[in-house]
Image (cartoon, coloured by chain):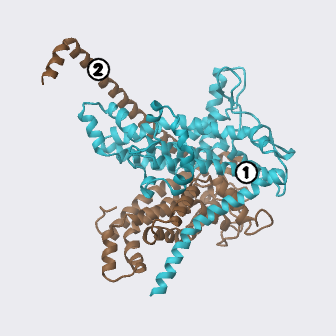
Chain colours: A brown, B cyan
């Protein structure tokens, strides 16, 4: 007590003043930084708004029913590209989901921490970091050609989808892993107490419980696939045939919306390419907005249907 | 029933193994093609990496411009992008009222979701003409097209914002509440709390995000290819004058040259092999960045990062093989600097 008294006694009113001015300074800087942070955040919001509004303003007048559904020789319509985008995404997801789900189940439910799981995790993280252009070239090597010579699948939707599988397997795997890990342990214990074995627990308890999160992960991945270009340019091919595009044959070549946007700029054989490019870019952003809104809606809906409440997740 | 259990276990385990097989075959096949540049075509590895002059059609494979281009683009993007990203993260976690926080989340998600080709397209129709206009009206005299490193850096900055922001938000929001409360209880303002407590405590998590952002920037292809002008023989920076400055002329990066040259390369040729060598180089760089991010995350004091949470500590190969080699180097970092770097666990 006496020490404090001495000190404050020794410090005359000048010390008090100095402390007060330090506090004022600190408050001042606090306000400045708060202002800067508000500014940065609103800048980002404005940037996003600008991107969306700019694209809509530039290309909305290009969009028409014909533009979205028809094909023509001059490639001024996007029908094949819309079809191929969804075709390749669905094909890739159909291949990717089983593998990713099984691998996630293994990592969460079966494996103990071992050299094998370390290796799997290390490979997953490294694969997630590989640039997509390298995966595109790898897909060309393995799927399109026979190690660089001749033809295996050729430029095809299947080769494109398989490359997308490689690109998205690590993402989907870690999303699924997180989803399964979030399932409370009590459910596992309860299921096993009822006499269910591991496989039954996984199939009847874990997957249904984690289903909303699993679906969210799938839709997120699909949204990523819509925008993928670099991995597809050398695997899915740069063009669609005018007459043969509307088929389910996975071995025909087909460009997606993003590849079309690329070829429009790189090759420029289409008349008024800038016009078509603006329309294609707008179509892409509209699709993505729809996907994002759909994701929120679907997640809420499934959550309500399955859990009955809507507040778990 | 037993055999079903056993088969299902094997099936699940082999699905997990698929990832390992894929990663191994990427390294093996890209690597096999890459080394042909040196084994079949007898290019000098030193000349490949340390000389400029990229024209593989005529047997000239010096990739220095491309490597410098990739590195400079990445560094510029991180220098511009990291402060903004951390600012957004601080806004979301510390400053924003509830409504603003809920508003920012979909904004960041949407920015993540915009495809790189759209960023490239916007860069081409907005950023490039803007740079050309600014350059020509301020500098005058010399006609500039706007294509080049500056445009690439700006586009990349926007592209890595969501990556760094997401991880920084993740880190800051999982810091123990006690840290914040303790600092505020000592009478610190919000900014003092951020600067003296939260940023140091979250530094390794934020740094993880920055390194992952670098990984994204260096691997980015389409957006950069739209705006950089792809001149593989013009350096993006000049070091010869009193201070380094960024060149406004068109230049190129590894990824852009991979994209453009691969279409024209015939299979057995130096051109083809040289492209694979570039690809392998990029693969090694990006793997090193992933490893670096894992390492930084594993050094985190508060283990806040999602990656660190999953494995609890550095991977075995790291602590056995690499860490002992690095330990003597780390000892030599001066103490005042070492305290500011997330290099050591608090308990060690």
Query: Which residue is the site of mark 1?
Result: A270
The reply to whether label 2 and label 1 mark residues of one chain is yes
Q: Position of residue B35 (x, y in %)?
A: 77, 54
Q: Secondary structure at mark 2?
A: helix
Q: How many marks?
A: 2
Observer-nearest of B44 and A24: B44
Side of B62 where B322 appears, left or right: left
Mark 1, Cα crowd under 10 Å, few <14 / some 14-19 / many 20+, is some
Between the residue at mark 2 and the residue at mark 1, the CA separation in whole angstroms equals: 67 Å
Q: Answer with left or right where residue B345 lies relative to residue B134.
A: left
Disc 2: which residue: A22
Q: Position of residue B80 (x, y in %)?
A: 53, 34
- Placement of the N terminus of chain A among the 4 image quadrants: top left
**In the image, is residue A109 above or below residue A61?**
below
**Relative to A35, A18 lies left or right:** left
**In terms of image quadrants, where is residue A8?**
top left
Q: Is residue A71 something one can see in this rendering?
A: no
At 76% across and 67% down in the image, what residue appears?
A146
- Give me the chain letter of mark 2: A
A181 or B217, which lies in front? A181
Kindly identify which chain the residue marked by label 1 belongs to: A
**Quadrant showing the C terminus of chain A:** bottom left
**Residue extending farthest bottom:** B1
> Between residues B261 and A8, which one lies in front from this camera angle?
A8
- The answer to whether A233 is drawn above or below residue B108 in the figure is below
Of the image marks 2 and 1, the number of the one nearer the N terminus = 2
Determine the residue positioned at 62% across, 61% down.
B23
On the image, which quarter does residue A204 sit in?
bottom left
Residue B198: give x, y in percent of width and height.
36, 38
* Residue for point 59% across, 42% down: B122
The residue lying toward the viewer, choosing from B24 and B319, is B319
């Amino acid at each position: 007590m006496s020490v404090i008294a001495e000190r404050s006694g020794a410090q005359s009113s000048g010390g008090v003043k100095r402390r007060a001015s330090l506090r004022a300074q600190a408050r001042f800087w606090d306000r400045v930084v708060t202002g800067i942070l508000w500014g940065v955040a609103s800048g980002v919001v404005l940037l996003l708004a600008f991107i969306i509004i700019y694209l809509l303003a530039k290309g909305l007048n290009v969009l028409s029913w014909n533009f979205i559904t028809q094909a023509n020789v001059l490639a001024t319509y996007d029908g094949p590209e819309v079809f191929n985008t969804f075709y390749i995404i669905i094909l890739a997801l159909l291949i990717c989901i089983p593998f990713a789900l099984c691998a996630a189940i293994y990592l969460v439910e079966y494996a103990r921490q071992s050299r094998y799981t370390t290796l799997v995790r290390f490979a997953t993280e490294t694969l997630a970091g590989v640039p997509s252009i390298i995966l595109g070239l790898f897909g060309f090597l393995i799927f399109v050609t026979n190690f660089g010579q001749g033809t295996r699948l050729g430029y095809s939707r299947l080769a494109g989808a398989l490359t997308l599988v490689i690109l998205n397997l690590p993402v989907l795997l870690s999303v699924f892993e997180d989803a399964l890990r979030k399932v409370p342990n009590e459910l596992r214990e309860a299921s096993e107490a009822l006499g269910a074995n591991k496989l039954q627990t996984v199939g009847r308890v874990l997957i249904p419980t984690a289903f909303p999160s699993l679906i969210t992960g799938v839709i997120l991945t699909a949204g990523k696939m819509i925008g993928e270009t670099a991995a597809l340019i050398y695997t899915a091919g740069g063009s669609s045939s005018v007459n043969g595009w509307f088929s389910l044959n996975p071995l025909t070549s087909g460009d997606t919306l993003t590849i079309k946007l690329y070829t429009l700029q790189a090759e420029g054989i289409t008349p008024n390419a800038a016009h078509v490019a603006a329309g294609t870019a707008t179509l892409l952003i509209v699709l993505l907005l729809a996907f994002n809104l759909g994701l929120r809606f679907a997640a809420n809906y499934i959550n309500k249907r399955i859990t009955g409440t809507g507040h778990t997740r | 029933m037993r055999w079903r259990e056993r088969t299902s276990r094997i099936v699940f385990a082999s699905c997990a193994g698929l990832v390992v097989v894929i990663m191994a075959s990427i390294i093996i096949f890209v690597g096999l093609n890459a080394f042909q540049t040196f084994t079949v075509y007898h290019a000098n590895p030193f000349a490949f990496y340390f000389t400029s002059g990229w024209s593989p059609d005529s047997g000239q494979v010096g990739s220095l411009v491309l490597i410098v281009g990739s590195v400079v683009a990445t560094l510029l993007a991180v220098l511009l992008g990291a402060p903004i990203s951390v600012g957004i993260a601080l806004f979301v976690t510390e400053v924003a009222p509830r409504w603003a926080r809920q508003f920012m989340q979909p904004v960041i998600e949407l920015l993540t979701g915009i495809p790189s080709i759209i960023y490239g397209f916007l860069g081409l129709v907005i950023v490039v003409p803007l740079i050309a206009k600014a350059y020509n009206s301020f500098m005058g005299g010399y006609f500039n097209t706007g294509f080049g490193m500056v445009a690439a850096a700006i586009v990349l900055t926007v592209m890595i914002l969501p990556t760094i922001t997401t991880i920084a938000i993740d880190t800051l929001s999982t810091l123990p509440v006690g840290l914040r409360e303790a600092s505020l209880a000592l009478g610190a303002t919000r900014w003092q709390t951020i600067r003296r407590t939260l940023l140091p405590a979250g530094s390794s998590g934020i740094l993880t995000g920055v390194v992952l952002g670098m990984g994204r920037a260096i691997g980015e292809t389409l957006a950069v290819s739209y705006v950089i002008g792809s001149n593989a023989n013009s350096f993006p920076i000049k070091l010869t004058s009193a201070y380094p400055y960024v060149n406004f002329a068109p230049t190129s990066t590894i990824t852009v040259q991979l994209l453009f040259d691969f279409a024209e390369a015939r299979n057995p040729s130096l051109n083809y092999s040289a492209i694979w060598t570039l690809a392998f180089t990029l693969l090694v760089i990006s793997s090193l960045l992933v490893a670096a991010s894992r390492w930084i995350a594993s050094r985190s004091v508060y283990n806040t990062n999602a990656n660190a949470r999953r494995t609890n500590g550095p991977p075995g190969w790291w602590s056995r093989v690499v860490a002992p080699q690095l330990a003597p180097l780390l000892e030599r970092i001066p103490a005042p600097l070492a305290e500011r770097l997330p290099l050591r666990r608090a308990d060690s």
